[in-house]
Image (cartoon, rainbow, N blue to C red):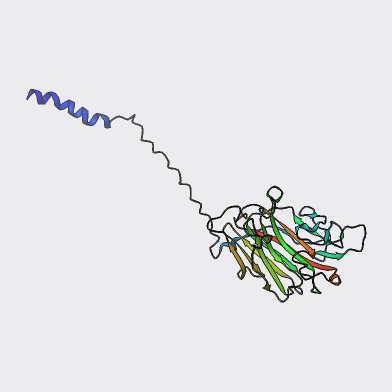
Amino acid sequence: MRQIKFFRPLLCLFLFGCTTSDSQEPAVVAEQEEPTPTVVAKNPDDADYWDDAELVWSDEFEGETISEDNWLFETGGGGWGNQELQNYQENGNAEVSNGTLKITAKRNMDNTIEGAFTSARMNSKEKFKYGRMEIRAKIPEHKGNGIWPALWMLGSNIQTVGWPACGEIDMMEYVSFKPNKTHFSIHSTRNNHADGTEITSGAVDLETIEEEFHVFGMLWSRKYIKFYIDDMDTIAFSFRRPTVSNVDSWPFSGDFYFLMNIAVGGTWGGLEGVDTSILPATMEIDYVRVYQVD
């Protein structure tokens, strides 16, 4: 009995002493950070991938001058690797008027200029990687054999790696001995016309190419390059990135720039001779536009 009386007060103190203190601070609960959302890259194979593309660059060729901010001229002769006959010059073969750029190939009647023909070759100063590219243009009226207009792109590293390692994308090529047709092609170290291994659509029928303006478009992603005429939902030719690829087979993961020109003669344009009566010959460009997906 004496032992029970001795322990009872201690037991009460042990059980209730810690709950009667007024100085007890409430427990602090740390705030949890919101989880960082996972960003899922859009898939270029999705049907609506290009629907959200936004215009990021364009030249509408308004006014009366060629934009020096947008374009530079390549000049000179020497065949340009294709035995072409024209001498490209900065003045006298390109102008902007009535809302279009006009590139004109001419027969040279000036003995002070090298070559039998003159023309213009314009390069965009801006470089691009992936996007929906569009050039609305009208090819010179068909009069005979010998001209070779082109709307195309080259890898911006051409000065360091050379051609075809830099890559080439031909959005539109036309040779006048094949009227009412256009061609789409890509070139790389593995596939190029110098070796006869280029990837090409061959001749694609376009009955009004010399009489009407058409949009020559390209959808270029990390997975493929697709070409279309007028409507991006109607693909005329496509090339998918090889499953196992490297810079030799797919140099199309870097920056590229636009080129627009008319060649005279050459290994392809002059394949069936040059009829000098076809000159002057003018290609008109209504606009160049680049759309990209965020």
Q: Quadrant of residue 106?
A: bottom right
Work out which quarter of the rendered image holds the N terminus and state it: top left
Q: Work out whether residue 185 or residue 257 is closer to the camera in this orientation and state it.
A: 185
Work out which quarter of the rendered image holds the C terminus and state it: bottom right
Residue 10 x %, y %: 18, 25
Is 108 left or right of 132, judged from the image as shown? right
Residue under the point 30% across and 29% down: 21
Residue 3 x %, y %: 9, 23
- Asked if 220 appears above or below 201 in the picture, the reply is above
Is 269 left or right of 222, judged from the image as shown? right
Number of callouts: 0
Residue under the point 10% across and 26% down: 4
Is 151 left or right of 250, judged from the image as shown? right
- Asked if 62 appears above or below 30 in the picture, the reply is below
Q: Quadrant of residue 145?
A: bottom right
Residue under the point 89% across and 63% down: 108
Residue that lies at the very extreme toward the bottom in this rendered image: 207
Residue 93 x %, y %: 85, 61
- Asked if 129 appears above or below 23 in the picture, the reply is below
Residue that lies at the very extreme toward the front in this rendered image: 195
Q: Quadrant of residue 147?
A: bottom right
Residue 173 x %, y %: 72, 66
Q: Work out whether residue 276 or residue 282 is closer to the camera in this orientation and state it.
A: 276
- Asked if 11 appears above or below 196 in the picture, the reply is above
